[in-house]
Image: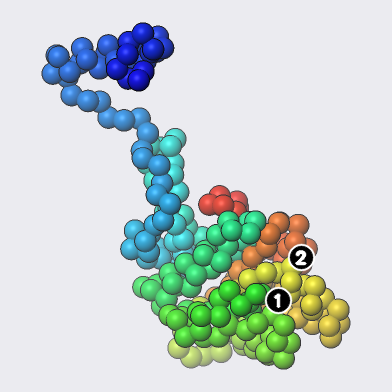
Amino acid sequence: SADHDPAARSELETAVATAAAAAERSGIAVPRRPWVDPLPERIALDEIGPCGRAGTVSLGVVDRPDLQGREPLEVDLERDGGLVVVGASGSGRTTLIRTLAAQVARDPHGPWHVHVIDHGSRLADLVGVGAVGDVVEVHDTERVLRLLRSADEEVSRRATGAPGPPAPRRLLVVDGIAAMEERYERLDRGEAMDLLARIARDGRAVGVHVVVTAHRRAEVPAALTGVRAAMTAGTLWL
């Protein structure tokens, strides 16, 4: 092979091998590598760590070659209000939602209530797991509207500043925003989509947050553009 046959090596490979052999003979320590190892294909939740500041959720790890290190991939729902998760099939959108649900369940800053509108029954098994209260199939019109009306009423109630104990953060997840818009944009004069947009717009200030997933950014309704953060294949856009 080229590793053992000097005649088969390139000039660069020969120079590297010569320098390495000379350093070894001189007892020079191996220098620190300029790059960290590639990110692993799978990362355990314990490796991500819990939520940092209140309203911030850690969802993964980011490779920062410019800093020769890594840092948590964090979403600041307190600042941005919500999140748009964009990616093709198989890119990890549903896995990210599962990670999000698991992370908020162990938030040291206080409890969360998570509600999911699911397209394709991919998240049905999250019912009762951690902070997830219910998972509603997108085609279940009655339950979807009841959930959205409840969340909208909660936003209005919190906005009045009524006295009482601190309310838990509430997270509304729509897995498949295109399917939801297709079903509800003309139903009851678009009530469901209007409710979702209002919750996304007004909820940030009172601890109610919206997360939606889409195959493409263009699928996200214009009314939800206030949900500023977008994520696709491990890249966070703000």
Q: Is residue 138 left or right of residue 185?
A: left
Q: Is residue 111 left or right of residue 140?
A: left
Give the residue displayed 51% in from the left and 84% down from the top: 127
Measuring from the top left, give residue 206's x and y in whole percent.
Answer: 57, 77
Measuring from the top left, give residue 4's x and y in whole percent.
Answer: 29, 17
Is residue 156 visible to us here? no
The amino acid beneath tag 2 is Pro
Q: Residues within 10 Å of mark 2 (few under 14, many from 20)?
A: few
Where on the picture, by quarter, is residue 68?
top left
Find residue 196 and name its label.
1
The answer to which of 140 and 106 lies nearer the viewer is: 140
For the image, the number of numbered tags is 2
Give the residue displayed 36% in from the left and 18% down from the top: 2
* Vertical side of 72 occupied by 33: above or below: above
The amino acid beneath tag 1 is Leu
Q: Quadrant of the N terminus?
A: top left
Secondary structure of the residue carrying numbered label 2: loop
* Vertical side of 37 occupied by 217: above or below: below
Q: Is residue 83 left or right of residue 25?
A: right
Secondary structure of the residue carrying numbered label 1: helix
Find residue 221 and name its label.
2
Measuring from the top left, give residue 58's x and y in whole percent.
Answer: 44, 61
For the residues marked 2 and 1, what is the alpha-carbon distance in whole angstroms?
10 Å
Q: Residues within 10 Å of mark 1 (few under 14, many from 20)?
A: many
Is residue 142 visible to us here? yes
Mark sitting earlier along the chain (2/1): 1
